[in-house]
Image: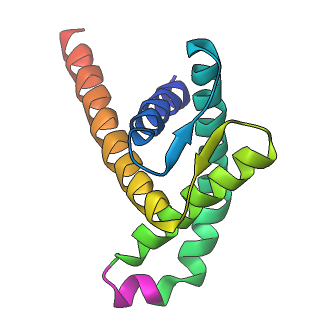
Amino acid sequence: MAVLLQLLTTMVAVWITTALPGIELGGEDTAAKVLTLLAVSVLFGMVNLVLKPIAKTLGCLLYVLTLGLFGLVVNALLFWLTSYLAGELGLPFHVDGFWPAFWGALVVTIVSSALAGIVRRAQHREDEVR
């Protein structure tokens, strides 16, 4: 259930990023767009699962020297890589460059965190009622 909620929050966050300039979501109709968002969210999750720990390990010194701000660059590069991989898989999702990827990754992080907090709070209240 937690994985499904994480996937849904990522889908919403990626959908919101498509309102930013330089991030495009194609698709014929709403169903195609939702399926594309689902696929991109799964792909983004896999990219983060595999590459983010490697990037954190290799860039440990940069994380320390920049007080964690290097993480924003890593997130942007991973979001941009997700766009590239989506294109290779034939998914109509495209990020035009580093800066759209930077702002998109920032929005995904903020929205995902906010939605995850709301879900946790709702689950906590539900547990209190029981």
Query: Can residue 92 be found in the magenta stretch?
Result: no
Question: Exactly how many numbered labels are in the figure?
Answer: 0
User: What percent of the width, then of the height, locates residue 24?
Assistant: 54, 41
From the viewer's side, name the closer residue of 60 and 27. 27
Which of the 4 quarters of the picture holds residue 123? top left
Q: Is residue 19 above or below residue 110?
A: above
Query: Residue 126 or 92: which is nearer the viewer?
Result: 92
Where residue 128 appears, as percent x and y from the top left, is 19, 17
Q: Split into 4 quadrants, where in the image is the C terminus?
A: top left
The answer to whether 130 is drawn above or below residue 52 in the figure is: above
* Res 129 → quadrant: top left
Residue 45: x and y in percent read: 60, 45
49 w.r.t. 33: above or below? below
Task: Write the residue at 79% across / 38% down.
Answer: 90
Q: Residue furthest top?
A: 130
Please report the residue visible at 48 percent of the width from the left and 33 percent of the height from the top. Answer: 6
Q: Is residue 6 left or right of residue 87?
A: left
Counting from the top left corner in percent of width and height, residue 81 is at 65, 59
The answer to if 64 sits in the magenta stretch is yes
Q: Which color scheme is applied?
A: rainbow
What residue is shown at x 67% (from left), y 32% (from top)? Answer: 39
Q: Magenta span: helix, strand or loop, mainly?
A: helix
* In the rendered image, the vertical position of residue 107 relative to residue 30, given as above or below: below
Q: Using residue 27 as the reference point, say whether residue 113 is left or right of it.
A: left
- Start-end of magenta stretch: 62-67
Q: Choose top left, top right, bottom left or bottom right for residue 43.
A: top right
